[in-house]
Amino acid sequence: MSFSVGSQLQYTPREAYQRCRQGSVILDIRPELLCTYKAFDVPQVLYCPWQEIGKYLDQLPADQEIIVADSSGIQTREIIEMLTGAGFKNIAGIGGGMVEWERDGMPVVMDNAARLSGSCMCQLKFRERKL
């Protein structure tokens, strides 16, 4: 069930997945290291780290719904506000980001060669490889 945070529309992962199957695009704003290991498995995903989004506003599709996603939903609200301020009209977020996406069983593409290790997903260290 979609919900609003302030004036921002937030989809559950299941709703976001269905929207993507109907033509919406996910804007994945996670750091490259996280996107390389686990990616949203939907027809259209654009990747841009949240710190660099301002540089790429002119490359975002103005005619499609953009669903902003990060790891856990922390940066999503800020980016939605920025995009709305830049004139984008059809913007939403995924409540809980990739964490909730996986928890809800939505499809993910994984590259185990890029897997990170550490006590949590915030530990950005490449997994040690045994030779």
Image: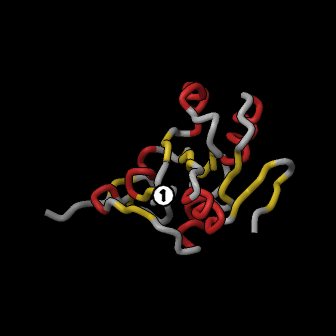
Q: Would you say 89 lies left or right of 62 here? A: right
Residue nearest the observer in this picture, 16 or 23: 23
| Residue drawn at (57%, 73%) of the image | 103
Residue extending furthest toward the left: 131
Percent x, y for residue 113? 27, 58
Percent x, y for residue 52? 55, 31
| Residue drawn at (57%, 51%) of the image | 23
Image quadrant holding the C terminus, namely: bottom left
Residue 87: which quarter of the image?
Answer: top right
| Residue drawn at (39%, 62%) of the image | 109
Residue 114: which quarter of the image?
Answer: bottom left
| Residue drawn at (58%, 33%) of the image | 53
Residue 112: which quarter of the image?
Answer: bottom left
Image quadrant holding the N terminus, namely: bottom right
Query: Could you tell me which secondary element the residue under label 1 belongs to?
Result: loop
Percent x, y for residue 24? 59, 50
Crowd around label 1: few <14 · some 14–19 · many ≥20 (10 Å): many
50 over 98 or under it: above or below: above
Q: Would you say 129 lies left or right of 51 here? A: left
3 over 90 or under it: above or below: below
Looking at the rendered structure, the kind of residue marked 1 is Val
Residue nearest the observer in this picture, 130 or 50: 50
Residue extending furthest toward the right: 6
31 over 17 or under it: above or below: above
Residue labelled with disc 1: 42
Number of marks drawn = 1
Percent x, y for residue 47? 48, 42
